[in-house]
Amino acid sequence: MKKRLNVLCVLVFVVIGIGLMPFVYWLAFGMKAGYESSSDHVRDIDAMMNAETVHLMPVGISHLEHATIRNDVTGEQVALWPQNIAVSAGVDYPGWYDVVNTLATVLCVVAVIVVVVLFLKLILRVNRGYVFEWRNVRLLRWLGGIQLAASIVVTLLQIYGASVVSGQFRVSGYVTDYFSYVSVLELSIGMVALIAAEIFAIGLKMKEEQELTI
């Protein structure tokens, strides 16, 4: 049982590592491009690295416009209907948004570290035989609460940022897809941890009541 638990925990960290690979790639790409490029290309690289990510959904098929892109396999131009695009729109955000967004990014990094530490503490306690204890319930509640709070803050900031972008950049036939900014997976992880904490709490209360009646 413990071996299976440990294998699953290792897989969790493998999945987290895979999820971080795009971030690491773009960070390395930006650093390499900035180092190798000439002064003529610095502006283009800066525009690309600071491009706005826009999530779009079509309004109606009759108003839909499409771009074209080259298919390297066949060499032909094919229609392209954008859903998620990166554009150098030069969006002007309110001054407070940049400060809050930067602060939220730092806090999210801290939150991820705290969640990982709490997760490791929980697994170590279970491996040592401390399973049904109130301390584990508190660890799960903290883990789920921090994960859920961080996800909500990030989601709200992304939705607000998307509203600012939509006021300064539009594509004919499309509207901003605000629903796609909601990370169902991250919110679900926080909720599952909180549900698991309550299941543990109910089991502990039942155990305590049984011990009192004996």
Image: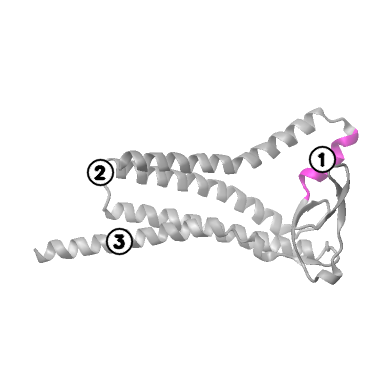
| Mark closest to the chain's N terminus, 3 or 2 | 2
The Cα–Cα distance between marks 3 and 2, rounded to whole angstroms, is 17 Å
Q: State the residue at coordinates (48%, 41%).
A: 13
Element type at marker 2? loop
The Cα–Cα distance between marks 1 and 2, rounded to whole angstroms, is 57 Å
| Mark closest to the chain's N terminus, 1 or 2 | 1
Q: Nearer the viewer, residue 191 or 138?
A: 191
Q: Principal SS element in the magenta part?
A: helix
Q: Are marks 1 and 3 in contact (CB under 8 Å)?
A: no
The residue labelled by disc 1 is 73
Q: State the residue at coordinates (70%, 58%).
A: 97
Inspect the image, locate mark 2, and give the three-letter code of the amino acid beneath it: Gly
Residue 124, position as x, y percentages in the image:
34, 41
Element type at marker 1? loop
Apparent side of residue 158 relative to residue 66 in the rendered image (left or right): left
151, above or below 9, in the image: below
Apparent side of residue 108 relative to residue 94 in the rendered image (left or right): left
Q: Nearer the viewer, residue 81 or 179?
A: 81
Residue reaching furthest to the left: 214
Residue 147, position as x, y percentages in the image:
49, 55
Q: Which mark is residue 129?
A: 2
36, above or below 79, in the image: above
The Cα–Cα distance between marks 1 and 3, rounded to whole angstroms, is 58 Å
Q: Quadrant of residue 182?
A: bottom right
Instruction: Residue 42: say if magenta.
Output: yes
The residue range painted magenta reads 40-51
Inspect the image, locate mark 1, and give the three-letter code of the amino acid beneath it: Val
The residue labelled by disc 3 is 201
Residue 145, position as x, y percentages in the image:
45, 58
How many labels, in total?
Answer: 3
Element type at marker 3? helix
